Image (tube, grey):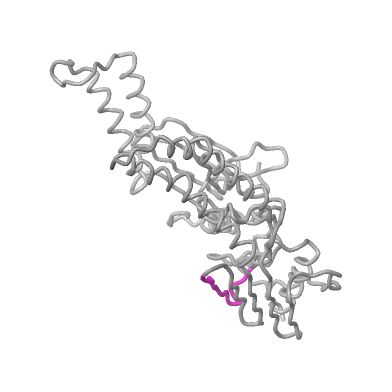
Amino acid sequence: MPLPDSNQNVWRHQTGGGATSLFGLPFFLVGMGVIVLTFIPQEARGGDALPFYFGIPFGAIFAAVGGAILFGRTELIIDRGEGTVFKNWKLLSKTVYEQHRELMEFDRIRLNSEIRQSKNSSYTVYPIKLEGAEAEAFSISEGRAKNKARSQAESLATFLSLPIHDEISGSVRVRDADSLNQSIREKFKSGTETNEIPDPPAIMKSRVDYDGYNLQVQIPPLGFNVGFLIAFAAIALFELIFIFSFAIPFFRNFEADSSALMFLIVFGFFFLGIPTFILLALLGNAFLANQSVSVSNQSLSVSKGWPWKKSATLETSRIEELVIGAKSRSQGNPKSIATIGFGKEIQAISDDATLSFGSGLSDEELIYLHALAKGILVS
């Protein structure tokens, strides 16, 4: 979020320092520790020899990464009065790198989501950029919290009076700066939102109760699909390989002692217990997890999941957008593997929350349910 400033023509954003710097402390200490140990004679410290050609480069890498996080500071300053964009990166008080751009180069703000890969995992970031027809994009931030990124993009759009080209839902939605904080009902009344209800599709999975004032939708479990079968087959194959390549030969030569028993329990848990749990989760998600949706001109409520349903409600006055978008796969979502193969859903979006439903339905059915729900919300 931007920092408050006495000059109303200035928008600031700073990163680094505070709690963020603590993430770099372990890396920095490990790196410095390895470097110091390299110079201590083996006779004095004991243990194995630590050659210079290993200790210095290894320690320097860790110390450099940790030091950059621990002491690094980034500041972004956008000045409407001067018509400039300025960003610098410092190590404590010393400027290492800086950028200067002119505001006239840019005519929009781009907000999207990107999946980044690390060595052992993947995670989602939400880049915010200033863009122009012929200008190189200028990066504002790359946060990992979707709602914070959305809020920051809206703050910047309001400050600069520029539209947001929002791609988080999977398609480009152009959101004008003067209507960002309006509810979907207010946008409909002003003419910036329209709604035409199509004929229902010939085949529908969901059960719909609609009287023009209230909408109740019951969406059955997803059932089999190609993505589910691929995930199920992959996990089952993994378990079979483990059983025939390791478990059976192990039991043939098994000797009943405590260490062998502990080894068996640990390996059985990781290579059989966890995959089996995932298989059960896939089955439960496919055949037991249904969705219930209730829409009135006061609120939208969604209940879904198994074996315990999770329910959430958004007041109509808080809903700013109702869109059909790509299914969100946030980092750390334990159910992401159980929802493989379902690409779209209906999303009700407010400043600080998003409710979604309809995953697994056909495009035609999503379009129909979206129009019905929107017709209730704007009435």
The image quadrant where one finds the C terminus is bottom right
- Please say whether residue 112 is visible from this viewpoint: no
Q: Nearer the viewer, residue 77 or 74?
A: 74
Q: Is residue 326 visible?
A: yes
Q: Where in the figure is residue 370, as x and y percent of width and height?
A: 74, 69
Residue 117 versus residue 219: which sits nearer the camera? 219
Q: In the image, which residues are magenta?
A: 308-320
Marker count (numbered): 0
Query: Where is residue 16 drawn, in percent x and y?
Result: 39, 44
Magenta highlight on residue 225: no
What residue appears at the point 72 percent right and 41 percent down from the top-left corner?
133
- Residue 190 lies, in percent from the top left, at 73, 73
User: Would you identify the image quadrant in which residue 45 lies?
Assistant: top left
Q: Residue at x 58, y 58 (%)?
A: 154
Residue 319 is a magenta residue: yes
Q: Nearer the viewer, residue 75 or 118?
A: 118
Which residue is located at x 49 percent, y 45 percent? 77
Q: Position of residue 117 (x, y in %)?
A: 54, 38
* Above or below for 264 versus 287: above
